[in-house]
Each structure stands twice: as structure tokens, then as C-alpha cells.
Amino acid sequence: MTRTEPARGMRDYLPEDIRRREHVIGVIRRVYERYGFEPLETPAVENLETLMGKYGEEGNQLIFKILKRGEHEASGQADLALRYDLTVPLARVVAQYQSKLPRLFKRYQIQPVWRADRPARGRFREFYQCDVDSLGSTSPVIEAELCTAVSVALTELGFTDFHLRLNHRQLLTEILDAAGVPAELHGSALVALDKLDKIKIDGVSKEMSERGISAAAIEALTEVFTGRIAMDLVTGGPMAGLQSVADFVSRAGDVPASVENLRRIFQLTENTPAAGHLTFDPSLARGLSYYTGAIMEANVPDLAGSLGGGGRYDNLVGMFLGQSVPACGFSLGLERILVVMGERGMFPPNLTTTAADVMLAVFDAADAPHALRVAGLLREAGLRVLVYPDADKIGKQIKYADSLGIPFVAILGGNEIAAGTVTVKNLTAQTQATYDQAAAGGAILEGLRQRG
């Protein structure tokens, strides 16, 4: 017998799942649009060369490659790949349509991506990303607006205990330099550091050692991420530890530009919804190699990993265009948000969970034309209507409606058809009344309002 479960790391979405997803997507989309972002979509499949080399050592290994087709299938070579994220396709689009896009291009994109990752709680091989990006400006106002928009979106979804961790990719480079990590091992060090929340400092130290980083450098990095500087983070405010890190990396008392950039982002968000959620974290690495400036990540206490993340990537578009285009973005992971909201019971109680507001029942198959006409009247009134297709016993039809949670049944028998009426049964209150067919829709809408 053929297996019926979906491929590992993939999921089927039943009606209740879809309604929850649409609720979350709707909230995120409305927030993004309030901040002036426009919608964009790109193909599920990209040329392999578009994706390769953009995500770092581990990212390249997680790309779902598509073998050549037809006469080239036997070669075992790949020329296409499933979209790995939404950022690289965005960079390609900007390069392709530069003359048609505004100088400051603000876009949001909510589409699935695919990664050949090991499935885990909140981690799937196919998942949706909810991206928001600004291209065309190096101003830290961009980062401040992104942090604020993400904070508003998470707050409107019901999250109150999230943290937006903020760091800077150049500052990480300066930390690694100051600790004595050779430049050629920076990439390896960042790959290991990006796993800090999962394997803790001992695991990161072990992995760094395996990657050829010296014990002295590892000890210095441990001091930054878990020692005295880390204590500053615990005891101080949102920018705590930033000065200590600046002292660690600076030469001759000069304040690094990366530190000044982070300070400015904090200043710009002081009186925004991001205030109270934004904190400096020198250990935040973000695994993707295209980041060039500030990097961000959203976390909640009961989820290993993040709800989303992002940062500045000023060089990525240049890989396609041949000239630098400043860019910065943030991506919320829909699946992880859904997992946490489901476990916490965060979905609104009035979230639609039924197929219809009213089911139309008939006694005789010959009355189907009348049923369809009345259903049309109810739909014109703004109701979601399910027409029961068979002339089963009325008790069976009502039981079916009740099993789906449909609150009203409109009964159309011979007497009702002759009189131009319809009998409406309220399954919750166990009451019924007869109305003119043209007035039934308004009566059912009023009943729905009374139910709340």
C-alpha cells in the first residue's frame, strides 16, 4: 500500500491550520503595509547559480537542488534549486528591475522556502517566511523602523515576552580580531558561535577548537560572551555591555563605527514600540554570510531558536548588479510563531473555525433549484453558506451541521417553498423561527452578532 504521510519535514494543512495561518499572515501583512512596505512575490524555483555561495558553508549544503531533466537527467547534475530564503531572490529582482523600482524600495514578501535541514520542533523543510526589507539607504532609521515594525507585529499577535537581540557583523569581526582569531577562521568561528543558544558555550568552544581556533582565543571569546561583559548585560539596561565590548575591541580609545551605529539604533527606537524589547547581545551571530552591518533576532523564552531574524546586507545586490545597493531586512518565521501561539493558546477565541455560518437543508432532491436560489440570497446578505447536497432525513442533516460547528440551519421544505419562506434553526440556542426568504439573511446575521 502506498504511504499516505507527507515527506519528512513537510506538512499537510487542514482547514483549522489554514485559518490560523491566515490570521497570523493577515496581522503581519497589515502591520508591514502600515510601515509603507509593498508586496512582492518570486518563483519557487531559482537558477542554482543564483543561490550558491550566498549562504555560507552550511547554507550551501541545505539547498534543495533540482536535477537536470529530459536527456540530461542521467548526468546527475543540477541546474535549478528550490528557493532557500526570500532575501537572495529579492536581490536578484532588484538587479533585474532596477530601472522600474523606486530609489528607496520597501517590500514585504510572504512565501514558502525550502531547506534540506533536519526537522525538529518548529523547524521544517518547507516553511513560510514573512520578510520585510528596505533597499536604497544606509541610514540607521531603516534598522529602527524594521525593529519597530517587527515589535508591533509580534505585539498584535499577542506576544509580550519577546526580546529583539541586536548586534553588528563588523563588531563581531572586531571581537574575533581582538581575541586573536585569524581572519581565515572568522567564518568558522561565526558558524560555531551561531549555535550558542543551542549547544551553549562549552559546545561552541569545543566546535571552535575542532575548527582550529586556539585555546587562548577561545578563552578570550568566552570572557566576552559569558564572563565579565556578559554580566554587564545582566545587570544593566538595553545597551549594557556595549561600552565593555567597545573597550575590548578598540585601539587607542577609538570608538568603532559599529558601536556608534548600534548606539544610534538604540537612540532611534527609544520612543517606539521596540523600546523595552531591544537588547544588545554580542554573541548574536546570524549564520548567513551576506550580512554586513547590524543584525537582529527575535526570541521568546520557551522556544529554542528564534521567531525570526535579519540584518543589513549592503553587498548582496552588488553580486548581481555589479554595484553596491544598501539593504536591510527582517524575516519572521511563520511556522515557529504558529507553534508557540498554539502551545500558549494565543489564538483569538472568535477566530473562525467553521466551514459556514449557515447550512441549507432540503427534504426533496427536486427542491434543489429552490435551495440554490435561497443560498444565493443568503450569500448576498454576507453569509457563508453550505448547501447540503442530498435529501437525507432532516435529523441527519442537522447532525452533520452540528458536527462541523455550523451555528444555523436553514430548512426549506414544501410549505416554505410555497410560502416563499425559510425556517431557520439556531443550533446553539435550540430555537427556530420562520422568515421571508429575503429577510432570512439579516435575521441570521443578527443571530451571529448576538453569539459574539
Image (cartoon, rainbow, N blue to C red):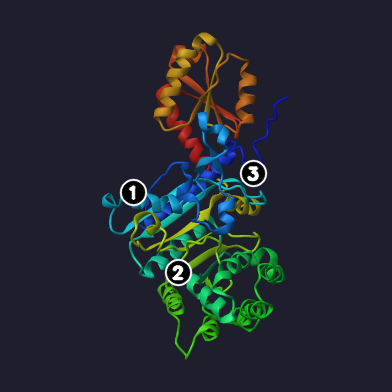
Q: Is residue 198 above or below residue 130?
A: below
Residue occupying image coordinates x 66% and y 41%: 8
| Quarter of the rendering containing residue 36 | bottom left
Residue on which disc 2 sits: 293
Can residue 277 be seen in this snapshot?
A: no
Residue on which disc 3 sits: 9
Give the Cα distance between marks 1 and 3: 33 Å
Name the amino acid, label 2. Gly
Residue density around tag 2, few if under 14, some if 14–19, many if 20 or more, within 10 Å:
many
Q: Nearer the viewer, mark 2 or mark 3?
A: 2
Q: Nearer the viewer, mark 1 or mark 3?
A: 1
Name the amino acid, label 1. Gln
Q: Is residue 138 left or right of residue 251?
A: left
Residue on which disc 1 sits: 96
Q: Is residue 369 above or below residue 348?
A: above
Can residue 100 be seen in this snapshot?
A: yes
Determine which of the numbered discs, if any, sits on residue 180 in the image.
Answer: none
Name the amino acid, label 3. Gly
Secondary structure under the numbered disc 2 in the rendered image: loop
Cβ atoms under marks 2 and 3 closer than 8 Å = no
| Quarter of the rendering containing residue 141 | bottom left
Cβ atoms under marks 1 and 2 closer than 8 Å = no
